[in-house]
Amino acid sequence: MDSITILGVAAGILTTVSFLPQVIRTWRTRHTKDISLYMFALLAIGIALWLVYGYIRNDLPLVLANAVSFLFVVIILVFKIRHG
């Protein structure tokens, strides 16, 4: 792996893992009152577009990071819709 790929992997891991505390908290408490539905909906769309872009560019770090991020954001959105 070259240094640019390592940089991409590190950035992907950090930005993806940043959603995990919110996912865990939302899962445990089922409390989503203070989470913006519109913000997370727009974020999900943006991440989905980054995922498609990464796929088109054949950029594995971009695809993996955005696939996991998309999953985390969708989990939060589902809780927001059900418990919001």
Image (tube, rainbow, N blue to C red):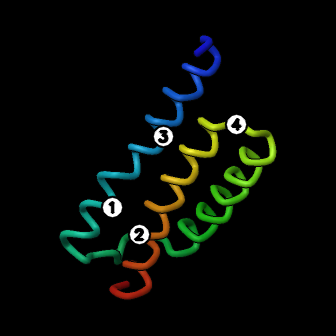
Dot 3 falls on a residue whose secondary structure is helix
The residue carrying pointer 4 sits among few (fewer than 14), some (14 to 19) or many (20 or more) residues within 10 Å by Cα, namely some
User: Which residue in the protein does label 4 denote?
Assistant: 59
User: Which residue in the protein does label 2 denote?
Assistant: 76
Residue at the spot x=33%, y=86% of the render?
83
Q: Which mark is residue 23?
A: 1
- Amino acid on which disc 1 is placed: Val
Q: Spatial distance from mark 2 to mark 4, Cα to Cα?
A: 26 Å
**Residue 41 point in image, percent of width and height:** 59, 71
As drawn, which residue projects farthest toward the left?
28
In the image, is residue 3 above or below residue 32? above
* Marks 2 & 3, CB-CB < 8 Å contact: no
Q: Which mark is residue 15?
A: 3
**Residue 13 point in image, percent of width and height:** 45, 36
Marked residue nearer the N-terminal end (2 or 3): 3
Dot 4 falls on a residue whose secondary structure is loop
Q: Spatial distance from mark 2 to mark 3, Cα to Cα?
A: 16 Å
Marked residue nearer the N-terminal end (1 or 4): 1
Q: Which mark is residue 1?
A: none
